[in-house]
Amino acid sequence: MKKILKWTAIVVLLLAVCGFLAFLYFIPPFFTTPPATFTAVMRDAAPPVTDIANPAQRVIAERGRDIVVRTGCIGCHAVNGPQGPDYSKYLGGGGVKIMTRQGTYVSRNLTSDPETGLPRRTDDEVKRVLKSGVFPDGHVAPYSVMPWANFSNWTEEDRHAVLVY
């Protein structure tokens, strides 16, 4: 009886290993598609900076655009549409709501709208949020809501470039 159980366990284990190896062999390789293809929708949603007349400011804004795209700000600051995130309203906010013990956090509007966007804040207030997570009213956004600790490693030039963009 023990011999039968032993051989049955060996056969089952062998079949499981063979099945797993067959699975790995037949799944499509992940590296046939360039990684940039997966982020193309979000990258292309970022408005270009070609309309900025001053060449020096355009270079700074291009750097800011690159930082914003690479950081993935649109992932949280998207607007909800009928089919999911609506990237045509770039950084419009409101698409992500996170509930914590401290309260409910809704992603902010980072557009140039004077009533609901960034122009109602000073540059120093925005830089303070990016550097330390402290908002103008004094509350600190939990790291689980906004990964400001990642942004705290940016240089002042990086923060300035993001603001110019």
Image (cartoon, rainbow, N blue to C red):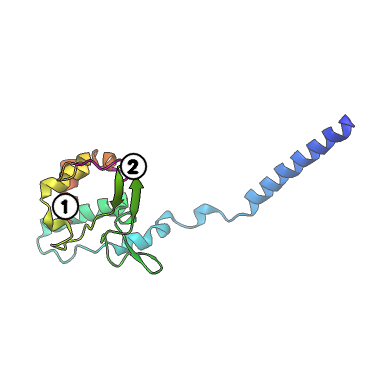
Residue at 16% from the left image edge and 48% from the top image edge: 126
Q: Nearer the viewer, residue 106 or 114?
A: 106
Instruction: Say which quarter of the image contains residue 127.
Output: top left
Residue at 24% from the left image edge and 38% from the top image edge: 153
* Residue 59 visible here: no
- In the rendered structure, find residue 101 and report the number of the disc placed on it: 2
- In the rendered structure, find residue 102 and report the number of the disc placed on it: none
Residue at 12% from the left image edge and 59% from the top image edge: 55
Crowd band around label 2 with a 10 angstrom C-alpha radius: few (<14), some (14–19), many (20+): few
- In the rendered structure, find residue 163 and report the number of the disc placed on it: 1
Give how far apart the Cα atoms at labels 1 and 2 are.
31 Å
Q: Say if the magenta span includes residue 140.
A: yes
Name the quadrant of the N terminus.
top right
Q: Which residues are magenta?
A: 139-147
Dot 1: what SS?
A: helix
Crowd band around label 1 with a 10 angstrom C-alpha radius: few (<14), some (14–19), many (20+): some
Looking at the picture, which amino acid does disc 2 mark?
Answer: Arg
Residue 120 higher or lower than 19, as above or below: below
Residue 118 higher or lower than 158, as above or below: below
Sequence-first tag of 1 and 2: 2
Name the quadrant of the C terminus.
bottom left
Seen as rendered, the residue at the extreme bottom is 82
Q: Nearer the viewer, residue 24 or 15?
A: 15
Q: Nearer the viewer, residue 34 or 6?
A: 6
Dot 2: what SS?
A: loop
Is 25 on the left or on the right of 95, as rendered?
Answer: right
Give how far across and how far down residue 8 sits, in percent: 83, 38
